[in-house]
Image: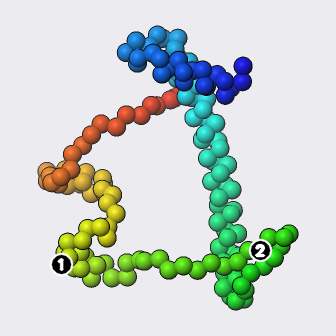
Amino acid sequence: MSEEDIVAELLVQTAKVPVAEAPRDMYEKVITQWREMRAKRLELERLAKSAQHAETAFKSYAIEVFRAQKLEGVMIGGRITGLNTRPVATVSNKEELIKFIRETGDLALLQFRLATGTVDEYKGDGKEVPGVEYIDVYDLTDKKA
């Protein structure tokens, strides 16, 4: 049986058995499989990160060559590579943007992401941030016994 088949079968089994009723042999298989898959994923991510680092360096260099030499495109091996330019909005004056948002109330201009560290600092100082609550987030650990 291939590894893919083992994973597929275990996924089918786990879908059928409620977690409160899972026998030890099943959750041991699940944990063992999770460890194996996690190790493989981490190795793949390490390899991908290394490849992405080189790819980004080559891309940056190529972009600068195109810009410095004013190239429109280069044909290599039957493929054409060219420089694409598109406008992207960026904040050039934070105070003016905040003033505009306050005046218009248009929060759609923002993307929300909570600065957890700042909320934690407030909490440490005995202050509460309105509209924020703490929730439990669960994860697994895996270390040598």
> Is residue 15 among the parts visible in the rendering?
yes
The reply to whether the C-beta atoms of the residues labelled 2 and 1 are less than 8 Å apart is no
Q: Which residue is mark 1?
A: 103
Q: Amino acid at mark 2?
A: Ile
Identified at 64% across, 66% down, the residue is 56
Cα–Cα gap, marks 2 and 1: 48 Å
| Relative to 82, 99 lies left or right | left
Nearer the N terminus, badge 2 or badge 1? 2
Percent across and percent down for residue 36 are 61, 29
Image coordinates of residue 24 in percent, x first then y, are 48, 11
Neighbourhood count class around disc 1 (C-alpha, 10 Å): few under 14, some 14–19, many 20 upward: few
The percent coordinates of residue 109 (x first, y second) are 31, 70
**Residue at 30%, 56% in the rendered image:** 114
For disc 2, the marked residue is 80
* Relative vertical location of residue 86 with respect to residue 123 in this rendering, above or below: below
Secondary element under disc 1, as helix, strand or loop, is helix
Q: Quadrant of residue 58?
A: bottom right
Using the image as rendered, state which of residue 15 and residue 45 is in the foreground. Answer: 15
Q: Which residue, as the protein is rendered here, is positioned at the far right?
A: 77
Crowd class of label 2 (few under 14; some 14 to 19; many from 20; radius 10 Å): few
Q: Which quadrant is home to the N terminus?
A: top right
Q: Position of residue 4 (x, y in %)?
A: 67, 28
* Colour option used: rainbow
- For image coordinates 20% across by 76% down, the residue present is 104
Q: Residue at x 70, y 89 (%)?
A: 70
- Amino acid type of the residue that numbered disc 1 sits on in the rendered structure: Glu
Identify whether 107 is placed above or below 11. Answer: below
